[in-house]
Amino acid sequence: MHIFKRLEQYIAAVFKLGRIERIAKRADRAAAKNAARTEDIFEAMTHRLEELTGKLIEITQEQNAKSEDHKVWIKGRFAEQALHINKLSHRLDQFPRGHRSSGSKIGLPVPPSQSEELPEGLGLFLDTFYNRLENRFRGSREEILDRLRIYHTDVIDAVNRTGGKPVLDLACGRGEWLSLMRELGIEAIGVDINEVQIASAQDENLEAYHKDAFEALREAENESLSVISAHHFIEHISFPQLSWLVLEAQRALAPGGLLLLETPNPANLIVGSTNFYIDPTHKHPLPSQLLEILFETAGFGSVEIRYLHPGDNLAEMLSQPNINPEIAQLLFGPQDVAVLGQKSKSGSLS
C-alpha cells in the first residue's frame, strides 16, 4: 500500500513538471514575441524620430535663411533712412546759414500776399465787417489790452537782452499791443491789411501802418528787432506761410530776441469745434504741439507753451459735485494758447 502511494505521488509530480514545462515554453514564446514587437516599435520610433529631426533641421535652415534675408532688408532700410536723414540735416544746416547771411535779408521767396484782389468797394465792406466781428466776439479794446499785460515781463526782458531794439507787431488790428508797448516805453511798430482797424489804431496816435505782414517782416533788417509778435494772426494763414514767418523771425530778431505767437486753443472742444469757425477768415486750428515743434525746427530755444484765458464757466463747473474736472477743462478750459521762443545768443541753431 505504501509503494502504491509513493508511485501515485511520483506520477503526479511528473504530470506537474510537464505542465510547468509547457507553461514555461509558452512564456518563452510570449516573451520572444513581445521582444520582437518591442524591437519593431523601437525601430519605428527611431525612424520617426529621425524623420522629425530631419524636418526640424530643414525648417531651422529655412528660418535661418529667411532671418538673414530679413536682416539684410532691415539693414537696407536703415541705410536708406540714415541717408535721407543726413540729407535733411545737411539741408537744414545749410539753410539757416544762408538765411541769416549778412548780404541778404531773406533766403526764401516771399509767400503769397495776405490780401486778395477784390471788386471795388467789397474790400472796404469786408474790413468793416471784420472790425465789427472782432468788436463783438474778441472783446473791447480795454479787455484785450488787459489780457495782453501778462506778457509785460517777457517783453521787457527781451528788450533788455537785445539792447533796446524795437518791437514789430504783425496784424496789429486796433493796436492794443502797440498801446501796451507805449505804456512800457518801448518803441513798437504795427502793420495790418485791414484799413478800418488801422484807422482806429492811428486815431490813438500809434505807429500803425496799412501793410502786408509778410512784406513788413521781409523788410526788417537782420537782427534788428527785440520782439516779433502776432496775436490771433497765424490761424488766418497757410502752414507754408506760417513756416516762412517763423524762419524770417529767426533772421530779423536780434540774439536773445523773442517770437510770440498767440492763437485759439483747439484743445478746448468748444473753441476747436465751434467758436473757431465764427471767423470766416480762419483757415485751420493750430495745436500747441505743432507750434512747439515748428519753433524748435526753426532754431528757437527755450520754447514755452502757455494756455490762457479759461472760459467764464470753468470755476462754476468745477464747483459742481458730479462734474468730471477733465471734461470741464475740455469744455471750458483755456481758450487761447501762446508759444514763446527765444533766439539763441549766438544766433545759431540750437
Image: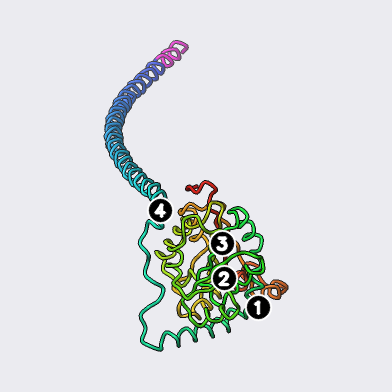
State whether residue 154 is above or below residue 89. below
Mark 1 vs 3, N-terminal side: 1
Question: What numbered label is drawn on residue 99?
Answer: 4
Secondary structure type for disc 2: loop
Q: CA distance from mark 4 to mark 3?
A: 21 Å
Secondary structure type for disc 4: helix
Q: Amino acid at mark 3?
A: Pro
Q: Residue at x 46, y 61 (%)?
A: 220
Q: Position of residue 252 (x, y in %)?
A: 48, 58
Q: Which residues are magenta?
A: 1-10
Q: Residue at x 64, y 59 (%)?
A: 156
Q: Which residue is mark 3?
A: 166
313 or 33, nearer to the observer: 313
Mark 2 vs 4, N-terminal side: 4
Q: Amino acid at mark 1?
A: Glu
Mark 1 vs 2, N-terminal side: 1
Q: Which residue is mark 2?
A: 268
Mark 1 vs 4, N-terminal side: 4
Q: CA distance from mark 2 to mark 3?
A: 34 Å
Q: 10 Å neighbourhood of mark 3: few (<14), some, or many (≥20)? A: some
Q: Which residue is mark 1?
A: 142
Q: CA distance from mark 2 to mark 4?
A: 36 Å
Q: Residue at x 36, y 20 (%)?
A: 24
Secondary structure type for disc 1: helix
Mark 4 vs 3, N-terminal side: 4
Question: What numbered label is drawn on residue 26?
Answer: none
